Amino acid sequence: MKKIIGVLIFAILSISSFAENGHNLWLRNTGNKSVNVVCVKSSPTLNIAKQELKQGWQGVDDASVEFRVMADKAIKGDGFKLSQNAIQANTESGILYGVYELLRRQQTGEAVSDAVINPSYELRLLNHWDNLDGTIERGYAGLSIFWRKGEDALVVSNNDKVLWQEYARANASIGINGSVLNNVNASPDMLTIDILNRTKAIAEVLRPYGIKAYLSIKFSSPSMIGGLKTSDPLDPEVIKWWNAKAKEIYSMIPDFGGFLVKANSEGQPGPQDFGRTHADGANMLADALRPYGGIVMWRAFVYTPSSEDRAKQAYNEFTPLDGQFRDNVIIQVKNGPVDFQPREPFSPLFGAMKKTTVMPELQITQEYLGQSVHLVFLSTMWEEFLKSDTYQEGVGSTVARCTDGSIFPQKHSAIAGVSNIGLDANWCGHHFAQANWYAFGRLAWNNQLTSGQIADEWIKLTFQQSLKEANTKDWTENFLNPVIQMMMESWDATISYMMPLGLHHIFAGDHHYGPGPWYAPKGLRSDWTPPYYHKADSIGLGFDRTPTGSNATGQYHEPLQSQFDDVKTCPEKYLLWFHHLPWDYKMQNGKTLWNELCYRYDTGLQQVRQFQKVWDKVQPDVDQERFVQVQNKLREQCRNAQIWKDACLLYFQQFSQRPIPYDIERPVTDLGALIKNDMGRP
Ligand code: GCW
């Protein structure tokens, strides 16, 4: 009897659960129809395009699709012209992108109408913060897929190649065409022959998918590995060394993309160590790469422990250099002026550098947004950022247009995302974190897409079991819509339970996971401690960045400057970013600042509770493996959201001396215990 029941349970389970570990990402579906591909040429890229189309075809049975690699003025860069029976592009990569677009449309039920589809940015890159020993800075999905330590560190195994190929395919399918293979806190060893050989092997796997390899370099490499006495960018020997290094790299990797540089930032060496400017440093490298078509991405993430507001420093340092950079230098700027916080206003450098190419750097890995535990769909944040109006060249000078070449004449245009990829079976640690990788690629391709559309596509590709299912009302109502809604609200929820109303950087320690508004060990530089940012006192809360404070608002173009300065017109989402306000300050809804803060924290927590309900309810439509994993993550997120709420409210209450409104659930943890346990990395 027991045996029969066992068999029965097993049978039921295997019908209802089609085990999936997430490794196939949004590329799970294969087609069931046949298609003829007409293509006169053959090449590694075109062969992949053919194979993908045949494997994924879900259109009319026995249809023919022609690939035409043929120049057309309307088609830009990697763009393509799409119709039911043909894909035309200037480049072979363009054909591949056209194939993925066609397949995505078939799978998501979007019509295939004749259209020219061009990318917003020429260079669409992932930045891996992977170290040579295989660890990943701010990585939460296992070790590196590129590097490892140990005896076989330099062996290129078959498994490596398979994984790199899967990685390349996933990237190509969303339009990503470049990968920086190592951490911006770069090891000088990156440029040694052994590592260059491995880089070459990686580049060879990425190449047919239209992806170029780039490296982060350490500015002091000439003295650290080159035996030179200095790394001064104006020293003839140093220049010679970099020229020779560039030549060596390109002899091995003819399509090498270029360098990414973190210089004079958080202790990294840079040109200022020799009394030179960022422009001197960047230009020297750019000149070395120029003969081969390489570029330099020079980061603007600079700040020192000075009396100047950290949020102002990058602008102060870089705007005077506008116009001094070579045209193959791109200044890479984080979306916000501080550091990938849950929410920041856009960095005022966007649109302000008018004679220099500027590229946005987004962070896909969730360093400050719950790492691989919290379900946070970052597309909504990036959409808000890209659509922010800088007003630098009149109304409509959005960050998107200031960076994609629509406004300023620029030789290149680019965007980068700090990768959330590791060796975990599902690549990203959290199944829903895959949506952020997907969204980054889609927005890099088209910076006008809406997050709603991206979520819709991603869910269909990632969860639907068949095309038939996608078209049913049931699946749409019971699965697609509630999950889209959950994703669309998730960023907002996280802001609410972590840092509402413009609060920022109130994390514990340096792991950046849990709350630590109190964290200020003696001797630590103050701009690395939360009190520097929240400035809670008996009067109120927030960082005064108006003219009575640091005057960071002065870095924004009118009308933003006046709008941010005036507490009545400053968007409430940035209120405490720009203002220090009394606890009894009246919000637009009539509540006091203190009460509003309490309600926001509580709302955020309630939203996560709601996400749990949404997820539990969709169980019948998800395979068991992914269902349980996401369910467990949501439970942990919920517990942690509770800790965020309790920690922040109890801590700030010491200053506000006001009760938490009585209709809100009471804290369930003691502040003393929270401080003592200082919630670490999960
Ligand atoms: O957000 C901070 C991170 C560092 C990172 C740095 C940067 C790579 O905490 O880990 O270092 O930014 O972007 O350079």
Image (cartoon, grey):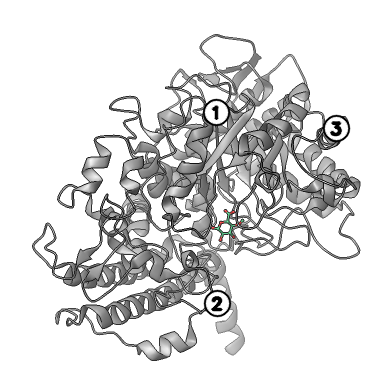
Q: Is residue 377 visible?
A: no
Considering only vertical position in the picture, is 606 above or below 367? Answer: below
Q: Are marks 3 and 2 in contact (CB under 8 Å)?
A: no
Label 1, label 2: how many angstroms apart (C-alpha)? 59 Å
Looking at the picture, which amino acid does disc 2 mark? Leu
* Residue extending farthest left: 590
Q: Which residue is mark 2?
A: 8
The mark nearer the N terminus, 3 or 2, is 2
Query: Residue 528 location in percent, x, y?
Result: 50, 66
Q: Quadrant of ligand 1?
A: bottom right
Query: Residue 34 location in percent, x, y?
Result: 62, 30
352 displayed left or right of 576: right
The mark nearer the N terminus, 3 or 1, is 3
Quadrant (top left/top right/bottom left/bottom right) for the C terminus:
bottom right
Q: Which residue is mark 1?
A: 413
The mark nearer the N terminus, 1 or 2, is 2
Does the beta carbon at disc 1 come under 8 Å from ligand 1? no
Q: Which residue is mark 3?
A: 240
Looking at the picture, which amino acid does disc 1 mark? Ser
